[in-house]
């Protein structure tokens, strides 16, 4: 992994999560709706805050992917065929999952919704999509496709909750 233990790097994790939480709170304060419509707005506010941070640091993103692949390559070289969790990689994903779970929890709380599936599973899906989208963006620099992916992600996630 990278020295900071991130696959997708944005800079300081607290800066990223603080900015996303601030965007969600600001959006929530301006809403006159609740439920799944509000959830979509709040998810979009958080994801929209994340994208410029990711886009502004392509060197960090690439370095983080390279570091991750290097660690995993060392682990799997030598003919290892049994899949056993990598302690460093697993810890990094648990941390990312926790932060995304908090993001999803805040969005649900402020919108008056409840997730239909375990939030940690939804968080893992969100991370996988964003990490794949960032890797693709690093290859093709197509902002439009990235924004469509993020919008589709928000749409999909909003179907995973019900109004309280």
Image (cartoon, rainbow, N blue to C red):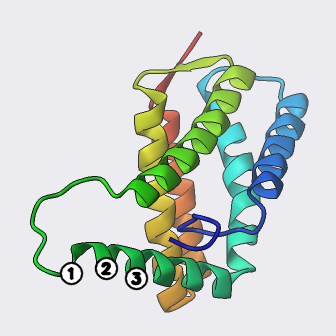
Secondary-structure class at tag 3: helix
Residue that badge 1 annotates: 77
Earlier along the polypeptide chain: callout 1 or callout 3? 3
Q: Distance between the residues labelled 1 and 3?
A: 10 Å
Secondary-structure class at tag 1: loop
User: Does residue 63 appear in the picture of this structure?
Assistant: yes
Say left or right for 114 vs 124.
Answer: right
Question: Which residue is the extreme one toward the top?
Answer: 164
Q: Distance between the residues labelled 3 and 2?
A: 6 Å
Residue lying at 53% horizontally and 85% vertically, measured from the top left: 138
Residue lying at 60% horizontally and 19% vertically, measured from the top left: 113
Labelled pair 2, 1 in contact (Cβ < 8 Å)? yes
Residue lying at 83% horizontally and 24% vertically, measured from the top left: 32
Secondary-structure class at tag 2: helix
Is the residue marked by circle 1 packed among few (<14), some (14-19), or many (20+) residues within 10 Å?
few
Residue that badge 3 annotates: 70
Q: Residue 30's spot in the image, x, y percent?
A: 90, 33
Q: Foreground residue, 152 or 49?
A: 49
Question: Residue 126, which numbered label?
Answer: none
Question: Residue 74, which numbered label?
Answer: 2
Q: Residue 39's spot in the image, x, y percent?
A: 65, 31
Q: Which-is-in-front pick, marks 3 and 2?
A: 2
Q: Foreground residue, 118 or 9?
A: 9
């Amino acid at each position: 992994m990278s020295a900071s233990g991130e696959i997708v790097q944005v800079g300081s994790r607290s800066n990223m999560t603080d900015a996303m939480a601030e965007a969600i709170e600001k959006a929530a304060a301006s809403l006159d709706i609740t439920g799944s419509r509000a959830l979509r707005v709040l998810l979009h506010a958080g994801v929209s805050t994340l994208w410029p941070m990711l886009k502004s640091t392509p060197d960090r993103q690439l370095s983080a992917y390279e570091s991750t692949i290097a660690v995993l390559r060392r682990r799997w070289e030598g003919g290892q065929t049994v899949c056993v969790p990598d302690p460093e990689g697993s810890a990094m994903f648990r941390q990312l999952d926790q932060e995304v779970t908090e993001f999803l929890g805040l969005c649900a709380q402020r919108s008056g919704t409840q997730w239909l599936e375990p939030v940690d599973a939804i968080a893992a899906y969100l991370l996988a999509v964003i990490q794949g989208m960032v890797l693709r963006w690093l290859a093709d620099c197509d902002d439009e496709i990235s924004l469509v992916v993020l919008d589709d992600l928000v749409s999909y996630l909003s179907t995973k909750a019900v109004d309280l």
